[in-house]
Image (cartoon, coloured by chain):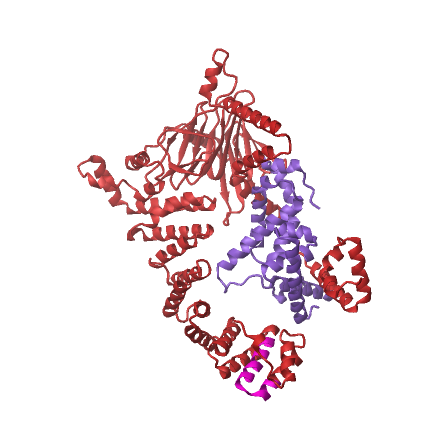
Amino acid sequence: MNMKCKNTRKRFDEYRENILAPAIKKRVTDHLNSCDCCARYFSEQLDLLALCKKIDSPIKSKEEWEKLRGAVLADVFSQPLHSNAGAQSLTWWKNILGSPARRSFRFAYAALTVFLAIGAVFLFLPRDISIRRDSGQGDQKAPPLSHAFSLVTSQRTIIIKKNIDDTIRPMQPSGVLEKGDALQTLESGGALVRLDDKSAVRVMERSLLEIRSTSAGDQRYYIASGEAVFRVGKRGPGGRFSVSTPNAKCSVVGTLFKVKVTWDSIGRKPLTELVVAEGSVDFGAAIGENVHAIVSSGTFMTIDGNSPSIPDAVPSKEKTFREFDSLTTAVPADIPWSAKDSVREESEKEPRAAARLVKAGPSKESNASPGNKRAVENRVLTDSSAANKVSASDSAIILAESLYDSNKDQSALEIALPLATGNAADSAVCIKALSLMQRIYARQHRFEAEASVMEKLCALNIPELRKEMLLFEIASIKASDLHKYEEANAGLKRYLLKYPSGRFAEEALLKSAELSFITKDYTQAKEKYQSYADRYPKGGGAMAAADKMAYLCDVMYHDYPGAIGWYGRIIDNSSEDSDIANACFWRAQCWKKLGDAGKALRGYQDYVSRFPQGKWEKEARKNIQTNGFASTQSVNRAP
Amino acid sequence: VIEINEDVVQACIRNDSDAYSRIFYETKEIVHGLVFKLLGPDHEVDDVVQNSFVELFRTLHLFQGKCKFSTWVYRVVYNVCLQHFRAKQRSRRHFLIDGKIDPDDCSSDGFNSDPKMLEEKQKREIIHRAILSLPMKFRAVVVLHDVEEKGLEQTAEILKKPVGTVKSRLFFARRELRKKLENSGAL
């Protein structure tokens, strides 16, 4: 039995891909041999496919690929990967319990796993427990080092401890760092990390150092940006000490050196600089291309992206040694007590109050007790340098921005939120904080919050151009994301009143008309579409406005002469065939409704001659046969 | 053909930079090609390619080997492109229109260009422009099935849609595409 044309055409792709059952394939072939129309259809489709296959992407040079790879790997290594261990273990459990093995075997397997897991937990318990267990035999396992640190800071500095669980805490004046912790120093800040084995790490200002391993035998650090000076204590046999950056890795055994990471202006390409003051460092690219060299004392070397430089001598070896030595051994500079105490007091009150701490700047409490010496000094500091306060807030904003850049939205929000509610004196900070919050909410698709932040921003002293854009954006969010059409429409009206010939006036007017149409306020919609068509006859939405006007006149207001005019405008100006075809047909329908049979007949004939394959071809022919008076029930116009 | 075995994937999960590089080199053409074909000559293509790779590496541990590695790569890249496309649409900055192919760009080939090649290039651009003018759901099936020459089933797998849906989208997309190409004289 021969196959129908429709069914044959439906199977074009399967036929071409040769995945049809042999019997069906034969029927398709037979049909194609006997039906010219389908054969032509298949050939046309093949022509189209041949054209599509011609598209190819531009060729990238080797250097461009290398650059891209460097950027990708820098991105990948700067953020923790594969973090959904929970989901993975769940899948694993599902696999065990859902395996087709016998139930008793499955549960025995699960029990064994649990037993092994508990054993593993005991095995890797912290040092104190393992020592107790091994007492008398000596501890075979290298204990993890404690990273006692002290602050080297000034009033304008905040140091934040960023744990692996993404919480931010102000650093206590002394404490222990753990694996996964990171130190972020701000402008004029710094931190000194001292280890039990006499090693020391001095983190310079505006740097981010992450502690990747704290084991005595294997200490690993990561510098995402900024610089740090390392003094490495004596290693045991096989003991490793390494510092990695987004594009380089330094492995050392007993030395004094500095690693500095800087990024290019667009933050894509890292540059790592290594200066060795004592001992030697195995310095190489982070990506295993065997690009590495031994950098000895008194020399420096850089890796720009993936390109290493030749090691060169530092201008003054002694001076470098003295500088590094003092940085890692000297007693930390005295901290102005107000800033130090504010850190301490705030952190004691609330451990996660980094943002409040920043906002406060010099201690607020000082003003409450003028008799107190500290308070007097504090007030002097506060009064004499208002800039300090602003700069502390600015530092917080820098930190929040850097957290936002590394996708730590929640932490960035925690810092930005209190700053955003600042007073008028801090309006610049407030604007920065609100702008950051807006970006965070936009990224999180929290449109309601985004709109509310933008409204707050609008009320502040921001450039007029930005205000204009925000007004329009708020209305757009309300319309397209929150579906609050009436509020959006009101917002657009406000925008149009304030900026009648603004940058977005055209779009705002069209959107406003559409919103009136959606909310069934047809009178308003008609007025706005009319106004749009008059003001922007060549605008991007002119044809859409004309179509809506024609619909409103034709269907809603039965103003057929008006509708004929709008259809005529579409026919004359539209570049879309489908729009012209529809307008031709509906114009003929309007003439018919007006009882002008002659014009209606000419309209239908025009439609049939211009669009013989058109959507309304049958209906038009029927009308031609009945001299323009066939039933119109089946062709009601939709908007 | 992507030749990535289980060991390389596992090495990546362990943060082995060599393994990352291997996957990068194996998939770079696919990723860049798909992004370019789906988004057009956008100035953000490189950013999307970079994001695609980062997403690829970030979600590598979720690859369970139930489908081909290439299918999985296509799916991740498609999702990143879709995300970018939506974000861009949502930004509502219509006055900053990207992706327009300027016919004058063809002259950048230099004076020695073969006119036939130039014509061919122009034709390619017209086709690409026509594909880019399709709605994203149609564009995706045309790019994956007709341009990248993936089978119906693989396209369905990449888009996570039933084969029937892919077939119907292909039908409407091709009809639309044909119309556009006929109007522009390319067909």
The quarter of the picture where the N terminus of chain A appears is bottom right
Q: Which residues are magenta?
A: A580-601
Q: Is residue A152 above or below residue A187?
A: above
- Secondary structure mostly taken by the magenta-highlighted segment of the chain: helix
| Residue A343: % across, % down | 32, 36
> Is B169 left or right of A224, judged from the image as shown?
right
Q: Is residue A272 above or below residue A462?
A: above
Q: Residue furthest top?
A: A136
Q: On the image, which quarter does residue A622 sit in? A: bottom right
- Residue at 64%, 83% (x, y): give it: A624
Which sits in the foreground, B157 or A26? A26
| Residue A35: % across, % down | 79, 67
> Is A44 left or right of A553, judged from the image as shown?
right
Residue B104 is a magenta residue: no
| Residue A579: % across, % down | 58, 74
Q: Which chain is red?
A: A
Which sits in the foreground, A240 or A473? A473
| Residue A329: % across, % down | 41, 27
Q: Is residue A275 above or below residue B45?
A: above
> Is A365 left or right of A128, judged from the image as shown?
left
The picture's colour for chain B is purple
